[in-house]
Image: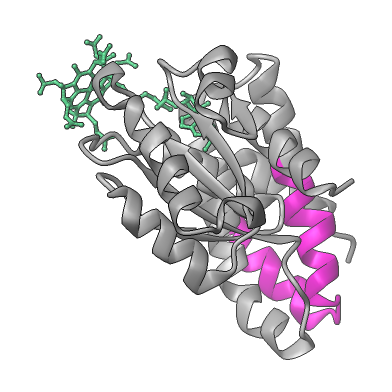
Amino acid sequence: MDLTALKDAVIAGDVKGCTILTEVAIKAGHAPQKILNEALIAGMDVVGEKFRCNEVYVPEVLVAARAMKKSLAMLKPLLAQTGAKPVGLAVLGTVRGDLHDIGKNLVGMMWEGAGFEVVDLGADVPADKFVQAVKDTNAQLLGVSTLLTTTMLGMKEVIQALERAHVRSRVKVLVGGAPVTQSFADEIGADGYGESAAVAVDKAKALLGIA
Ligand code: B1M
């Protein structure tokens, strides 16, 4: 069995297909890391590219990510047994005062699809909680999202809190969300800005030096 059908099921957001084909792939003896790389991540790469080119939109990405997550959940125990390492560890959240989490969730799913382990702190996250999570997990990447102009400065507070806790230099900070721009990211001292979830994957990899 080759893994193309599973990759296609991810792209199509076919949860049932993903469940069956992941089981078939495991039973056929494919290494879990291979299934992850050649079907799940490869499938999400295609979805990310289509999203970037406006060939698919948010609903299709969410559906594909949900299907990918179903397969990922089946692979996770096997990946743990083989000692396969994620490409990086990311902490992610929406700033304090902001309850919008759809775009942030999309970023998290796309990061997982690209092989990152993601610790999602949810929405309305105070700066100190971001700092604590970075310390606790030793994350290399911190993603901060906001949708409200009134909470944008909360991103600067997160960066200042990282500096106060002397952990700023050990984590790359990527910011995003509808009102955020590259110049705002530069102004608050973030390492990067992702204008969309697909771009957030490329930027995260570039910041961590992952090919
Ligand atoms: Co609210 N809301 N909302 N809302 N809401 C907006 C954002 C708004 C633009 C609507 C409007 O007025 N036209 C406006 C903000 C105006 C402003 O600040 N300039 C607004 C407002 C005012 C409010 C309230 C204040 C309304 C009120 O109560 N008076 C209130 C605030 C509550 C709070 O947060 N404290 C509020 C509440 C809500 C709901 C709870 C009802 C709901 C959120 C549900 C949820 O998220 N669970 C909601 C929604 C759904 C929206 C709109 C309609 C849609 C947002 C969304 O999910 N978009 C929005 C209007 C709009 O955008 N059309 C609006 C889809 C999502 C995929 O896009 O989040 O932009 P987005 O994410 C993109 C990119 O931005 C990027 O990638 C994603 C995909 O490519 N991205 C990142 C996002 N985070 C990233 C992080 C990265 C990188 C990229 O790196 C870490």
Which residue is located at x 89 percent, y 46 percent? 211
Is residue 190 visible from the viewing direction of this image?
A: yes
Which residue is located at x 42 percent, y 18 percent? 178
Residue stretch in magenta? 17-44
Asked which colour scheme the image uses, the reply is: one colour
Q: Indicate the position of residue 104 as horizontal and vertical percent values.
A: 43, 39
Classify residue 176 as left or right of residue 203. Answer: left
Q: Indicate the position of residue 177 as horizontal and vertical percent values.
A: 44, 25
Ligand 1 location (quadrant): top left
Instruction: Say above or below: 49 vs 1.
Output: above
Classify residue 143 as left or right of residue 28. Answer: left
Which residue is located at x 69 percent, y 42 percent? 204
Q: Tell me, yes or no, whether the highlighted magenta stretch contains residue 67.
A: no
**Camera-nearest residue between 127 and 12:** 127
Instruction: Say above or below: 140 vs 85.
Output: above
Q: Indicate the position of residue 143 as horizontal and vertical percent values.
A: 52, 44
Classify residue 20 as left or right of residue 34. Answer: left
Is residue 14 visible from the viewing direction of this image?
A: no
> Of all residues shown, which one is farthest toward the bottom?
81
Q: Tell me, yes or no, whether the highlighted magenta stretch contains residue 41.
A: yes
Classify residue 13 as left or right of residue 42. Answer: left
- Quarter-wise, where is residue 151 in the image? top left
- Quarter-wise, where is residue 3 in the image? bottom right
Quadrant that contains the N terminus: bottom right
Which residue is located at x 75 percent, y 35 percent? 46
Q: How many marks?
A: 0
Q: What secondary structure do most residues of the magenta stretch adopt?
A: helix
Q: Indicate the position of residue 15 as horizontal and vertical percent values.
A: 53, 54
